[in-house]
Image (cartoon, rainbow, N blue to C red):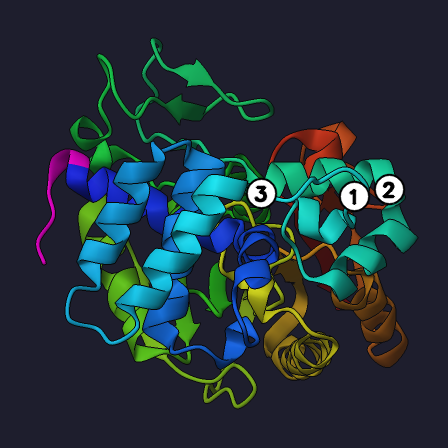
Amino acid sequence: MNLQGRDRAFALKLLRETTVWRARLDRALVRFCSKPLDDLDSEILAALRIGAVQLIILGTPPHAAVSATVSALSGHRGSGLVNAVLRRLAEEGEPDMDGAPLHEIWSHPESLTARWISRFGREKTEKLMEWNNSVPGIGGCLIDPEDDLEKGLYLDEYRIIERTGKNPLHSITDNVYIQDEAAAITGRAAAELAAGGSVLEIAAAPGGKTHHLQAAANFVISADSSFSRMRRWQENSARLRWRDSIPVVADGRMPSFRSGFDMVFIDAPCTNTGVYRRRCDARWKWSDEYLESSVILQRELLLTACELVVPGGILIYSTCSLEEEENRLQVEMFERSRNYFHRICLPGPAELVRDGMICIYPFEHQVDGMFTAAWRRDQ
């Protein structure tokens, strides 16, 4: 189905809001189903959630929400169930949220909510979850900044791009890599330290940090283990005319390079807890096991890739996670294991740099969560 214009925009909105509010929607739906929601046919469950999000979140008139959802299931044996459940929800409404658990109110995994409350406190946790559920803006560092666009909070060259109006996005797509200002802050800091040198970028696709590094470095080798993600990297490279940047499909834990680099930048795979606003489906992947596997992978990348840094060169480690296990605890592990690397202070806005590391929290800084640390290898 090739949707265009308003139909496409509405379909994307339905997808996002259904994903974001899944736990809250399920809380409202489960009252009217005779068996657990997870035991339902996947198409039926998806239809129930799509109907519920229109009734509860989007404020769609009940008749339109129910009839359109049921019509989309025409011919499916479960359409009668969907009709009956959504009609009852339309009549009785959402259950009272007063006294509901925070993870249901803001639709996040229960175990993650408890973890954040323990670490940040209830007030900051609620601010964080509210941020995660908000619709992200569009912005990026323009090659040729336009004075009539709103500036970012921290970078002079960062611009906030209106989705509509006199500066439509399509008119400047060849001039900007769309990313949150937090990612741009890390990219700019790395580029400043990489000036004139050789860079190996690990887990590079789709190129958010490459965009900054290639403008400053002598050359950049961008490696990623995913063919499909590297195809996106190549599309971005062609569109933005990246120079002296070489894409490589490779596992950063098994580097095949004979010589070292002035900088190795690890844009580490992580649980993404700092960017749930932009990756709204990522919250539903959360588990203690997922965190553990991410930590193991990050450790392997750090301890392997660091050996490719030449004496006097720089190692940078970055995640878009808020979890200490992926950030400060990894820094402590690395510094115990490789005492010939010494932490250096990253350049960046003073309010975002702590102990030389970029530490960004959405509930404090109003941009996505980001963590970055850097070390210099002994001569």
- Relative to 235, 267 lies left or right: right
Disc 1: which residue: 125
- Relative to 172, 246 lies left or right: right
Which residue is at 51% across, 50% downward? 20
**How far separated are the C-alphas under marks 2 and 1?**
5 Å
Disc 2: which residue: 122
Disc 3: which residue: 94
Q: Residues within 10 Å of mark 3 (few under 14, many from 20)?
A: some
Secondary-structure class at tag 1:
helix
Residue type marked 1: Thr
Residue 207 appears in the picture as rendered: no
Pick the residue in front: 232 or 244.
232
**Label 1 near label 3: C-beta < 8 Å?**
no
- Label for residue 116? none
**How far separated are the C-alphas under marks 3 and 2?**
24 Å
Which residue is at 13% across, 36% downward? 5
Pick the residue in front: 364 or 267.
364
Secondary-structure class at tag 3:
loop
Magenta region: 1-6
Q: Residues within 10 Å of mark 2 (few under 14, many from 20)?
A: some
Residue type marked 2: Arg
Secondary-structure class at tag 2:
helix
Which sits earlier in the primary sequence, circle 3 or circle 2? 3
SS assignment for the magenta stretch, majority? loop
Is 312 included in the stretch rendered in magenta?
A: no
Q: Residues within 10 Å of mark 1 (few under 14, many from 20)?
A: many
**Label 1 near label 2: C-beta < 8 Å?**
yes
Location of residue 287 with respect to 64 vertically, above or below = below
